[in-house]
Amino acid sequence: MAHHVYNQFCPIARVSEMLEPKWSMLILSELGFGEMRFNGLRRCLPAMSPTLLSKRLKELEVQGMVVRTKNSSTGEISYSPSQSALDLKPILHQLAMWAHQNLDTEVKPHTLDVKVLMWSVMRRVDPGALPPALCTVIQFDFPELENQWQYHWMINLPGKPVENCSQDPGLDVDLLVTADLRAMTSVWIAHSTLADEIDAGLIDLAGDACVMDAFGRWLAVG
């Protein structure tokens, strides 16, 4: 590998050699939420080139941080975190909390990406927080965006992963979330609270009262 090697016995130096290469920690952070395919990682990390993503995954696999699995029936490749990578997850969480407390983590306009936000929400929400129902549909409306990206739907079916749609699924909507993209992103990364953004008039909830009440728990943001 062409990465800098410290050649020191210090454990911090050794782990830095593994995690310092650009994007490595972000890849591990995404994989910490479960198995993913290559295109799923690309959606989470759109600024990363496919070539570099492939290279980093191979490096992390060699280092024992990523497990590569091939489906014998379909030939599809998936990636999942090893136990060593899972052991790192609470450390990455603490690093994120330190950043919130000590760095300027205000959401900047150039960092906003509704596709990444919705993909991240889809993967990390807690479907079990919603009231029991055959199907719960949450619609997101970002009025400042162009029509192509303004509307998104999350479909919650019992026992199944949450689905994210950018095309109207034609289902009854249980909760409409009208939001400023910057405010919604700020809530998602815990820079601000859902209650604060609602009070500021930047996020509005309308629909079923029970779903509305559970929305914060569903987002796992309180």
Image: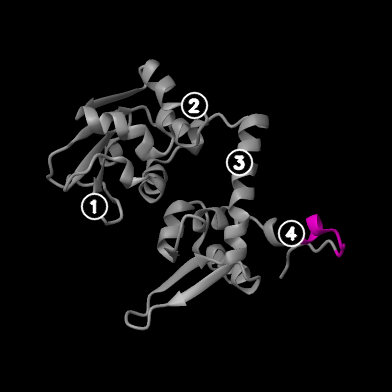
Q: Nearer the viewer, mark 4 or mark 1?
A: 1
Earlier in the chain: of badge 1 and badge 2, it is 1
Mark 4–mark 2 contact, CB under 8 Å?
no
Residue visible at 23% across and 31% down? 210
Earlier in the chain: of badge 4 and badge 2, it is 4
Q: Amino acid at mark 3?
A: Ala
Which residue range is magenta in the image?
Answer: 7-17
Q: Nearer the viewer, mark 1 or mark 3?
A: 1
Secondary structure under tag 3 reads helix
Q: Is residue 67 above or below residue 159?
A: below
Earlier in the chain: of badge 1 and badge 3, it is 3
The residues tagged by marks 4 and 2 sit, at their Cα atoms, a distance apart of: 32 Å
The residues tagged by marks 3 and 4 sit, at their Cα atoms, a distance apart of: 17 Å
Secondary structure under tag 1 reads loop
The residue that disc 2 covers is: 192
- Whether residue 176 is visible to the viewer of this picture, yes or no, is no
The residue that disc 1 covers is: 158
Residue visible at 13% across and 44% down? 171
Q: Amino acid at mark 2?
A: Ser
Q: Is residue 47 above or below residue 214?
A: below
In x, y percent, where is residue 44?
45, 52
The residue that disc 4 covers is: 15
Q: Amino acid at mark 1?
A: Pro
The residues tagged by marks 1 and 3 sit, at their Cα atoms, a distance apart of: 31 Å
